[in-house]
Amino acid sequence: MSRLAIEQIPVLSDNYVYLVHEPQAGLTAVVDPAVAEPVQERLRAKGWRLTHILNTHHHPDHVGGNLALKAASDCIVVGPGADRERIPGIDVTVGDGDSYGFGAAVARVFDVPGHTRGHIAYWFAEDAALFCGDTLFALGCGRLFEGSPEQMWHSLGKLRALPDETRVYCAHEYTQSNGRFALTVEPGNAALRARMQEIDRRRAQGLPTVPSRMAEERATNPFLRADSPEIGRVLNLATGDPVAVFAETRRRKDGFRG
Ligand code: ZN
Ligand code: FE
């Protein structure tokens, strides 16, 4: 049984870095440290010692703080085996189906290629916490830099199968613009419209919209809803092929300015 304490650190323009603290063993991981200094500051404020870095993928806004934090704390760097040569300071590689022990907690690892070819997600099942980097966002998903729509739809399928109460700790605050786009492909989704009102309210107060819960993502995130009849109709793709619908949704989002 574990009870993780999770700290959210906003950095750069819209990144979220997370501290994950396991109190029994006194372990603290940082997920995707874009930069080192704000992480050090929060560690000092909490009185925690950094023991692990958990990376989801190789992009600079996710690994930029790795080497400085490792030099300062001698922590263990964990990342995707499929991308070992692109993760600075990597010590331990993990991949699909692995369980990574973290004191009294366990992270299940999923391979979720699409945004990058080696992208992984960490799921702390007992604590209902998912760290999914740039694969799944609140109301969105990552751009397909190194993968196909088919691959990404399959990756997102693994995440959307997680329990309702799973908190989705994604790596960016993109929710409001994602939501504006979502409304263009599924305007009749009442849950989406209600969620968007709440998001607008929170952003007007400068509050984060992350983490969300998997149940609300399944109900409102168009990138998890390629099997929605309304989205198929709006995209003129009433083919019943979710990969085609997903691909077209992603393509439109790439060109969306709003
Ligand atoms: Zn990325
Ligand atoms: Fe990113």
Image (cartoon, rainbow, N blue to C red):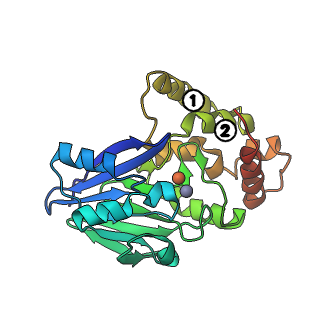
- Badge 1 marks a residue whose secondary structure is helix
Q: Is residue 118 above or below residue 130?
A: below
Q: Camera-side residue: 24 or 91?
A: 91
Residue drawn where x is 60% and y is 53% of the image: 142
Which residue occupies 72% across, 45% down? Answer: 253
- Residue 163, can we see it? yes
Q: Earlier in the sequence, mark 1 or mark 2?
A: 2
Side (left or right) of 194 relative to 129: right
Q: Is 134 drawn above or below residue 183 in the view shown?
A: below
Which kind of residue does numbered mark 2 sit on?
A: Ala
- Using the rendered image of the protein, determine whether residue 52 is visible from the camera's viewpoint: no
Q: Quadrant of residue 207?
A: top left
Is residue 117 left or right of 7 when viewed as pictured?
right
Q: Position of residue 216 (x, y in %)?
A: 51, 41
Mark 2 Cα-neighbour bin, 10 Å: few <14, some 14–19, many ≥20? many
Q: Measuring from the top left, give residue 179's x and y in whole percent.
A: 61, 35
Quadrant of the snapshot with the C terminus: top right
Please tell me whether mark 2 sits on a helix, a strand or a loop: helix
What label sits on residue 196 in the rendered view?
1
Quote the CA–CA distance across marks 1 and 2.
10 Å
Quarter holding the N terminus? bottom left
Q: Identify the residue under disc 2.
A: 182
- Name the residue located 74 percent from the left edge and 49 percent from the top edge: 249
Q: Residues within 10 Å of mark 1 (few under 14, many from 20)?
A: many
Q: Please state which amino acid type lies under the numbered disc 1.
A: Met
Residue 88 placement (x, y as % from top left)? 42, 69
Q: Contact (CB < 8 A) between labels 1 and 2? A: yes
